[in-house]
Image: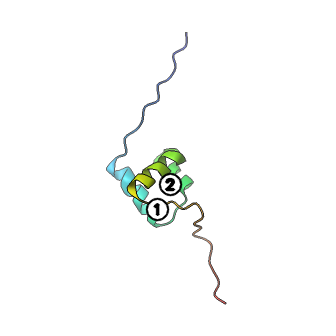
Amino acid sequence: MARKSIRRRRAWTTADVRTLKTQAKKKTKAARIARTLKRTEGATRQKAFSLGLSLDSRADVNRQVKAP
């Protein structure tokens, strides 16, 4: 019989949290931050929420508003 792999949660290190905070301040998209941290987007968003950080999905760094 084949054994099922057991998934274990990886603890957030201080380096992971620091990276999350700096990327959130730069308004980097959540999917990109998750890839950088090698975590799921859901886990990244959940951690950001628990830290009180905003990962607003509508934020677009490349979009510039032209003044009339």
Judge left or right: residue 54 versus residue 31: left
Which color scheme does this rendered protein use?
rainbow
Q: Which of the 4 quarters of the picture holds residue 52?
A: bottom left
Residue marked by disc 1: 24
x 43%, y 31%: residue: 8
x 47%, y 61%: residue: 54
> Of residues 51 and 60, which is closer to you in this image?
51
- Amino acid type, mark 2: Ile
Q: Quadrant of the C terminus?
A: bottom right
Residue marked by disc 2: 33
Q: For mark 1, does the 10 Å Cα neighbourhood hold few (<14), some (14 to 19), or many (20 or more) residues? A: some
Q: Label 2, label 1: how many angstroms apart (C-alpha)?
A: 8 Å
- Amino acid type, mark 1: Ala
The secondary element bearing badge 1 is classed as helix
Of labels 2 and 1, the one closer to you: 1
Q: Position of residue 30 (x, y in %)?
A: 53, 55
- The earlier-in-sequence mark between 2 and 1 is 1
x 37%, y 45%: residue: 12
